[in-house]
Image (tube, rainbow, N blue to C red):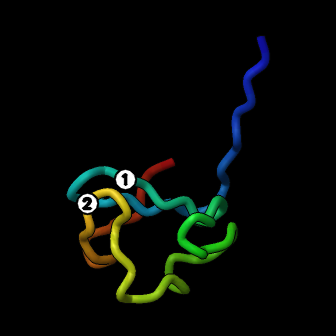
Amino acid sequence: MSTSTEVVRGRAWMCLICGWVYYEDLGLPEEGIPPGTAWEDIPDDWCCPDCGVSKEDFVVAPL
């Protein structure tokens, strides 16, 4: 059995409400945010895909 593990090296941002994590290296292609997109480059009106809160409710996540 073979498993693949993706190594994430860039910054990650975690939602303080639900714990969902945005990884800059991975982006969020299903929402039109390509891999490598910095947190600062995500629109200010973007919301957490799990709970709907704004970017203001995210903090840098430990990797």
Q: Mark 1 points at which residue?
A: 20
Q: Which residue lies furthest to the front in this view?
A: 30
Residue contact at pointers 1 and 2, CB within 8 angstroms = yes
Q: In which quarter of the image is residue 56?
A: bottom left
Residue 51 is tagged as 2
Report the Cα–Cα distance between label 1 and label 2: 9 Å
Q: Which is nearer the eye, 7 or 53? A: 53
Say whether residue 53 is left or right of residue 21: left
Q: Is 55 located above or below residue 30 in the figure? A: below
Q: Is 46 located above or below residue 63 in the figure? A: below
Say whether residue 40 is left or right of residue 17: right
Residue 42 screen position, x and y as percent: 50, 82
Q: Residue furthest right?
A: 2
Instruction: Identify which residue is drawn at 70% across, 41% down.
Output: 6
Q: Is 14 located above or below residue 36 in the figure? A: above
Residue 25 screen position, x and y as percent: 66, 62
Q: Which is nearer the eye, 11 or 31? A: 31
Residue 20 screen position, x and y as percent: 37, 53
Q: What residue type is labelled 1?
A: Trp
Q: Which amino acid does label 2 sit on?
A: Cys
Instruction: Identify which residue is drawn at 51% across, 76% down.
Output: 39
Helix, strand or loop status at disc 2: loop
Helix, strand or loop status at disc 1: loop
The 10 Å Cα crowd at callout 2, few under 14, some 14 to 19, many 20 or more, is few
In the rendered image, which quarter contains the N terminus? Answer: top right
**Of pointers 1 and 2, the one earlier in the residue sequence:** 1
Residue 4 screen position, x and y as percent: 74, 30
